[in-house]
Image (cartoon, helix red, strand yellow):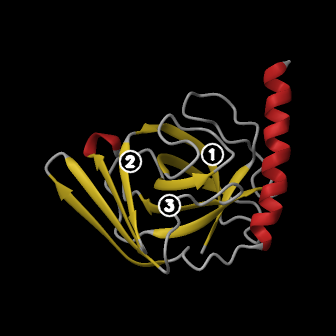
Amino acid sequence: MTKTVLLWTTFAAIFAIAMISSASASDTWLGVDNSVINYKGKNVQLLIDAADTIPKNAGEGVLVGFGWFYASGPDTVFAVTAHNPVRDSHQNPDKWHVHNVVASGSSDAAIADACIASLSGYVQSGISIKGDKMQINTNQNSLSGTLADGAGAFHIVVSDVACPNTTILADDSDSGLNLGVKFQ
């Protein structure tokens, strides 16, 4: 019973925040001017040059991310995200953290360009933000395939219209949320 109440309370908060976020979807920093992938032995360094100064704490109610599509592999996107109050990570859950994501098609592109079908594992990464630059350091074993060149930016949206299936979390539990992304 407590888990159900907590889930619905979280959903209500996210829904309210999603409405606010949609109204303020003009974050000047949420764009990618340039991105680079450096493979260094067993490590990978991902660099983003954003459109403006990236906040170190995106703030409560800001549901956003940057990501690279996989050129191959079981996952679709390697994403660095901030989405407080949604807590789904062991590392830095209320601020910037990393996910491997499996995406699926959206049934309404006006709302979401793609749906977040599932998160496929927790990824330990170091994230550094200085001005409009973000650097992500991770181990190659954290990647599930080869990353394609060029990162993109996105807002996370909650919509059962565009994304009729709920997102499955990395621990195989159902999030109870219909999550999608709107690319910038």
Q: Which residue is mark 2?
A: 73
Residue at (62, 45) in percent of width and height: 117
Residue at (56, 28) in percent of width and height: 171
Residue 135, located in which quarter of the rendered image? bottom left
The amino acid pointed to by label 2 is: Gly
User: Which disc, if any, is residue 28?
Assistant: none
Crowd tier of the residue under label 2, counting other residues whose Cα lies within 10 Å: few below 14, some 14–19, many 20 or above: few
The amino acid pointed to by label 1 is: Ala
Disc 1 and disc 3: Cα gap in Å?
A: 27 Å
The amino acid pointed to by label 3 is: Lys
- Residue 47, how many percent across, how many down? 33, 66
Crowd tier of the residue under label 3, counting other residues whose Cα lies within 10 Å: few below 14, some 14–19, many 20 or above: some
Circle 3 sits in a helix, a strand or a loop, which is it? loop
Up the image or down, 122 lies above or below 108; here it is: above
Disc 1 and disc 2: Cα gap in Å?
A: 15 Å
Disc 2 and disc 3: Cα gap in Å?
A: 30 Å
Q: Quadrant of the N terminus?
A: top right
Circle 1 sits in a helix, a strand or a loop, which is it? strand
Up the image or down, 103 lies above or below 34; here it is: above
Residue 74, located in which quarter of the rendered image? top left
Q: Which residue is mark 1?
A: 117
Count the labels in the image.
3
